[in-house]
Image (cartoon, grey):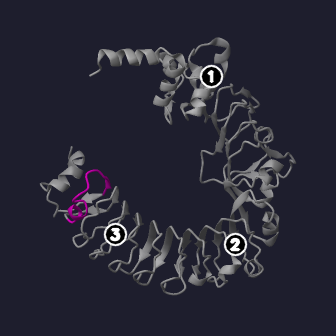
Amino acid sequence: MMTKNNNMLFYSIYKNSYLRSLIRAKVLQNRVIKIPGLKSFHLFDYQYLTLLSSDDKLRNNIFVSLTIVSIEDLLDYMGNYNTNKYPYIGIVNDLAIQCYALTHFNIVVPEGIHRLHLLIDNLMDQYQLPSSLTELSFSSRNKERIVGPISSECLEGILSNLPRNLKYLTIPSSLVMSKESNKQFVLPDTLVDLNFISIFKNFNRFVVSPSTTSSNRVYKGCGVVVDNIEGLLWLQDKRWISKCILFDRPIPESVFTDKLIPSHIRVLDIHMYSKPFIWDKDCLPSGLEELRIFASDINPNSLPCGLKKLKTRSFTRPLKAGDLPKQLEGLHIGNLNHDLNVEILPGTLKRLTIDSSSQLFIPFSLPIGLQILEMPNLVDSPFAKHSLPPSLTHLILPSFQGSFHAVGPLDNLKKLSLNVMNQSVSTILANVTTIDLSFKSIDQDVNLNDPCIQRFVKKIKN
């Protein structure tokens, strides 16, 4: 209950226009406010949002979002700045235009828009982008289809004249640059990240400023697909790219023996279908942090010491203590066909994913700090006592219908995914009060009068 003095204090603060604007912005900080459509401007009162300045929204990460899905709405939106049909439309700073394009229609995106998303399917319009834009992204409606070469003047025009305050740029990985154009795409100095994965020849069109190069800025969303030595040689001085995707055609052994993978690469995907990996660990960049191996096994002796994340189909031999890098935080194994003995997994490991395994965990084999365990294909193998560490926060077993009776309470669990929930679940959730619980069915042995079970199935019964 507010006292008279508290009331006076509140109003004395709120009368200050500067403090009032700060309070209003902090209340809405980090929120996305979705506008259902243009017609909603006549149905709802958005006047309170007009009190937020463009800087208020930018500084406090506030997005007022509008998605345009029809040509009619697009024309209505663009014409509003002459007709004032929608007086509060200026509150929008997050705009998505997802309708199929008109031919050679000039679209002027107004100042005040901070985030813009465009559909590239049949993109033929001419866009004039505002200097206020900080995020620009493109996508395709058909995500499975390979998008054809960029031949429209529109898209090349956008990329060759990016707004000077742009911070984030996202381009679909399936895009192929037109061979008929020589337009260059100069990345602004303000750019924080470029999300684009493509062959190195497509990156030839991008120009990075000397200031970006000298500051050792890295675009972490940027990845180059390489299927020959020429691509690796091109990558040598492109320090703003830290991810490399190697494809087997096959990959020459000299790539590893001659250490042709650039030293600045931090994330490496290798798609090798011909034979297991036999290179020495010194053949890979010493600063490599993430390594993903597809369609082949790997020799544990080949792993760089500083690796933090590893994904592999399997290993060429059973793992021994000391094989895995001491700083490893994430491990994804496609097929585990041998036991994981105690101290094989490093104590730094936070996430473990095993797609398929014929072996059970022996007691204390998982690190005491493990937080996420994911085994999508495990069906009914029971877990032994002390086989699951109490540090687990996420246990993802979408096919599991076995027992947890021997495990004991997992007090830190926040997410549990199962196929069949049986009575043994009450054992691991005995001291848990809230959890994200998902399952496909409830076993007949479940006692619905059990207080623990009631806590988590009540909302489902209702």
* Quarter of the image that includes the C terminus: top left
N-terminal of the two: label 1 or label 2? 1
Q: Quadrant of residue 66?
A: top right
Q: Tell me if I can see residue 376 in this picture.
A: no
Q: In this image, 453 relative to 136: left or right?
A: left
Q: CA distance from mark 1 to mark 3?
A: 56 Å
On the image, numbered disc 2 is attached to which residue? 285
Q: Amino acid at mark 2?
A: Pro
Q: Quadrant of residue 198?
A: bottom right
Q: CA distance from mark 1 to mark 2?
A: 51 Å
C-beta proximity under 8 Å, tags 1 and 3: no
Nearer the observer: mark 1 or 2; the answer is 2
Amino acid type indicated by mark 1: Tyr
Look at the numbered disc 2 and give the secondary structure of its residue: loop
* Mark 3, residue position: 389
Within 10 Å of disc 3 (Cα), the crowding (few <14, some 14-19, many 20+) is many
Left or right: 230 as drawn, with respect to 118: right
Mark 1 neighbour density, 10 Å: few (under 14) some (14–19) many (20 or more): some
Horizontal and vertical percent position of residue 301: 59, 84
Indicate the secondary structure of the residue bearing disc 3.
loop
Q: Residue at x 26, y 71 (%)?
A: 407
Q: Which residue is tagged 1? A: 77
Tell me where the magenta segment starts and ends, as one range.
424-439
Residue 282, image x and y in percent?
A: 69, 80
Res. 262 in view: yes
1 or 3: tag closer to the N-terminus: 1
Q: Is residue 427 magenta?
A: yes
Q: In the image, is 76 to the left or to the right of 30?
A: right
Identified at 77% across, 50% down, the residue is 212
